[in-house]
Image: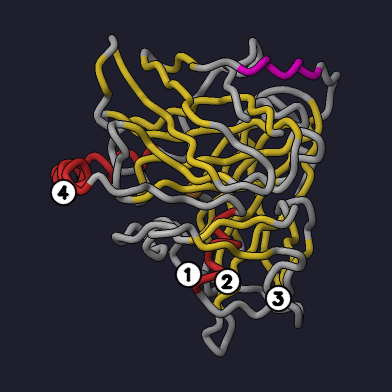
Amino acid sequence: MATASGPGPTEPPSADPGSAAPAAAAAARAPADRAALRMAGIVGGLIVALLGGFGLGRAATQPATAPPVGASHVDVPGAPQHGHGGTAGVNGESVVGGVANGLAAVAVGYRIVPGATVLPPGAARPFTFRILDAAGATVTRFIDNHERKLHLIVLRRDVTGFQHLHPVMAPDGTWSIPLRLPAPGIWHAYADFIAADAAGRQTPVTLGVDLTAPGAYAPAPLPAPAAAVAVGGYRVALEGSARAGAIQPVRFRVTRGGDPAPLDRYLGAYGHLVVIRTSDLGYVHVHADVTMAADAVQFWLSPPSPGTYRAFLDFSTGGAVRTAPFTLNVT
Ligand SMILES: [Cu+2]
């Protein structure tokens, strides 16, 4: 089962530094989104997201040039299919089979080529990279996925310092973003995207690369599981459990002063969940789409293995994106 924990002493929940523009965009969409929220309440439908990343979820609904080895796809009964770029769809599959993504710089015919990977801590440094295809050509065609063409997740080896960023791509395919690594240590960056080849085939990919922030590394202990965390004046409670090999709902209930907090749609969903296996930083990106389940953001989880995970819930309230971290013990 999964239980939750509060943020660690060295890991203050922080808004996504790269999300100021998305937050503003979300605010601009608020009226329509609230209408969607009301409708969602009426429909009371399931919010289904998947474990296995943007990528693996897409693999079940779109032709992929090379499905992840070892992954198998399991339909969640009654779940509509996943939509694209914030359209009205929900993830209809989950992934089991012991596969986590983002550990390798090369996967399913694509590789990531970073610029400088030694980034002195404390100040924003330019971080650049390109995605190459199997022929060595720089990829410039990416498919919108939750309103962005590429999602960059960054955290330190001790699963602190989570950042969810959206780099910009130059016409030549070079992605760049100012990246601040706040403290020394080995960090890991995950590039999560759907590449399109010349034939139009779409391949969901998550690639990873290590970054170094020189200096004395003082790893933080993993916070113990807890049922709720406080972030930015909100309380986020975790309900549900997760078992390896099973697909089970997990809900996050956001309240303020005991009342349900109205959530904005952010990047096409009421919540975005990244789950990291602490033993190896294996990456799982989960989304909840379209609807709320009894004032909670619900995901369907199928962890690839037992173990300890750190889950990061991105949610938006009043146009501001916040991150609530939880420790999950998966049996
Ligand atoms: Cu993103």
Tell me, yes or no, whether the two marked residues, 4 and 2, touch with CB atoms within 8 Å. Answer: no
The residue indicated by pointer 4 is: 32
Q: Is mark 1 within 8 Å of ligand 1?
A: no
- Residues drawn in magenta: 219-225
Residue 6: give x, y in percent of width and height. Answer: 57, 15
Residue 224 is covered by the magenta coloring: yes
* Residue 7 falls in image quadrant: top right
Left or right for 216, reference 188: right
CA distance separating discs 2 and 1: 6 Å
Q: Secondary structure at mark 4?
A: helix
Q: Earlier in the sequence, mark 4 or mark 1?
A: 4
Q: Secondary structure at mark 1?
A: loop
In this rendering, is residue 132 above or below 231? Answer: below
Residue visible at 68% across and 72% down?
A: 67
Left or right for 210, reference 95: right
Residue 131: give x, y in percent of width and height. Answer: 67, 66
Q: Quadrant of the C terminus?
A: top right
Mark 1 residue type: Ile
Residue visible at 72% across and 27% down?
A: 121
Q: Is residue 258 visible?
A: yes
Tell me, yes or no, whether the two marked residues, 2 and 3, touch with CB atoms within 8 Å. Answer: yes
